[in-house]
Amino acid sequence: MAMNFNESRTKENLMRAFAGESQARNRYTIAAGAAKKQGLYAVSQIFLFTADQERAHAKRFYDLLKKSAGETIQIDGSYPVDHFDCVKKLLRAAEHNELQEFDDVYPAFGNIAREEGFAEEAAAFHEIAKIEQIHAKRFGKLAKLLESGKYFESSDGKDWMCLNCGHIFHGKAVPNVCPVCRHEKGYFVPAELAPYLECGFLK
């Protein structure tokens, strides 16, 4: 049998998670602005795409706090200040934070919720943790491509998609402007990271 929700650690952990997801959404929105300023428009869109998923996570945790509607919940916590001009650093910081949620924070919160008898809350923590791992892998992949100089180039040749018009370019290096819509090269993203492009579609 579940304990009294308003006396539980789960209530506080839900508020911590809500605060963390809300801050992540804002950090990624700010990071998107930094990427856009540096001409990395596709990276900017990926930050915004992830930010919207963090908003969805925040809403889920907030909805689970409805039992405490009208209350003010006091929590303690530590949150990162990832204020960098370098997009590669922003991506690596995001990767690190997402992995912390996946490896440590949300599994611990989920286990506490299960111990306290809150099955729905436990499931939310554990399932969202899995999504954060996907976020971490995506940020890490982008960072690695930029760090290695392989985001816009490939010695073997590869496919990129222009996120503005959808043009697929195949070659060893992305052109300075898209040959279709004339948007600059920052709108291209490696095809394996392009949204809704099925595996094998180009074969």
Image: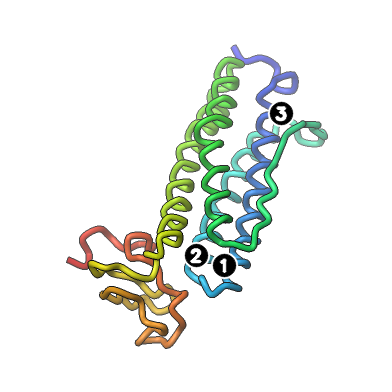
N-term-proximal mark, 2 vs 1: 1
Q: Is residue 5 above or below residue 102?
A: above
Q: Residue at x 66, y 25 (%)?
A: 10
Work out whether 107 lies above or below 167.
above
- Between disc 3 and disc 2, the foreground one is 2
Type of amino acid at the residue the image marks with label 3:
Glu
On the image, the x and y values in percent for residue 78 come to: 71, 36
Using residue 18 as the reference point, say whether residue 181 is left or right of it: left
- At mark 2, the secondary structure is helix
- Asked if the residue at tag 1 contacts the one at tag 2, i.e. Cβ–Cβ closer than 8 Å, the answer is yes
User: Which residue is more in the foreground, 56 or 74?
Assistant: 74
Task: Identify which residue, 129 or 173, lies in the foreground.
Answer: 173
Query: Residues under labels 1 and 3: Cα distance?
Result: 34 Å
Q: Which mark is residue 35?
A: 1
Q: Which quarter of the picture shows residue 105?
A: top right
Q: CA distance from mark 2 to mark 1?
A: 6 Å
Viewer-side label of 1, 3: 1
Q: Which mark is residue 43?
A: 2
Q: Is residue 151 left or right of residue 56?
A: left
Element carrying mark 1: helix
Residue corresponding to mark 3: 12
Q: Residue at x 26, y 68 (%)?
A: 155
Q: Nearer the viewer, residue 18 or 4?
A: 18
**Residues at marks 3 and 2 touching, judged by CB atoms closer than 8 Å:** no
Is 66 positioned to the left or the right of 139 in the image? right
Indicate the quadrant containing the C terminus: top left, top right, bottom left or bottom right.
bottom left
